[in-house]
Image (cartoon, helix red, strand yellow):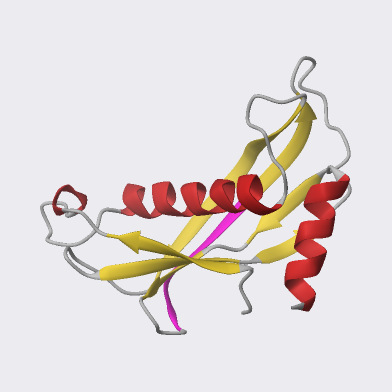
Amino acid sequence: MGYLTRHAFPTRWNDNDQYGHVNNTVYYEAMDSAVNAWMMAHGGLDPHGAVIALCAASSCEFHAAASFPEPLEVGVGVERLGSTSITWAPAILRAGESEPIASGRFVHVFVDEATRRPTPIPDAMRAAIGRSLTD
């Protein structure tokens, strides 16, 4: 899987659960943060703007465990680019490695902030994804 970017994900002491590994909810936080950071930095998303991206669905498959203080990364990939939605394919990876220890899926639907009705993906976002996929 090619990624638009790999976002640093430094684990924290409190990320470990009682089983001694990073808790599954922390992976969701890291993936959500990395995807939204990419959209804001590269696609022009303004979380307080007229068009926002709402998460309509998410899932994650866990392949291996990690623990603090292990440095991890989030790979931000795209599975599908629709007319009003993007299906992201984020992954949690050990720093510098290519095999994910967790594979996620986030569906963001772009909506009018006021009406919450679907609206086309903004041109700047579509162009940023297109540029990144061809780089």
Question: Relative to 95, does residue 14 appear above or below in the rendering?
Answer: above
Question: Relative to 49, does residue 54 appear above or below in the rendering?
Answer: below
Q: Measured from the top left, where is residue 132 in percent x and y? A: 73, 69
Choose between 46 and 36: the one closer to the eye: 46
The answer to whether residue 25 is seen in the rendering is yes
Toward which corner of the image does residue 69 lie, by quadrant?
Answer: bottom left
Taking the image as shown, residue 71 lies to the left or right of residue 67, namely right
Q: Measured from the top left, where is residue 15 in percent x and y? A: 21, 51
On whether residue 100 falls in the magenta region, the answer is yes
Taking the image as shown, residue 91 lies to the left or right of residue 10, namely right
Q: Measured from the top left, where is residue 20 in percent x and y? A: 12, 61
Q: Main secondary structure of the magenta part?
A: strand
Taking the image as shown, residue 114 lies to the left or right of residue 48, namely right
Which residue is painted at 34% across and 47% down in the image? Answer: 25
Which residue is painted at 61% across and 72% down in the image? Answer: 3
Q: Measured from the top left, where is residue 122 in percent x and y? A: 84, 42
Question: Relative to 14, does residue 128 appear above or below in the rendering?
Answer: below
The answer to whether residue 81 is seen in the rendering is no
Q: What stretch is highlighted in magenta?
A: 99-106
Which residue is painted at 88% across and 39% down in the image? Answer: 120
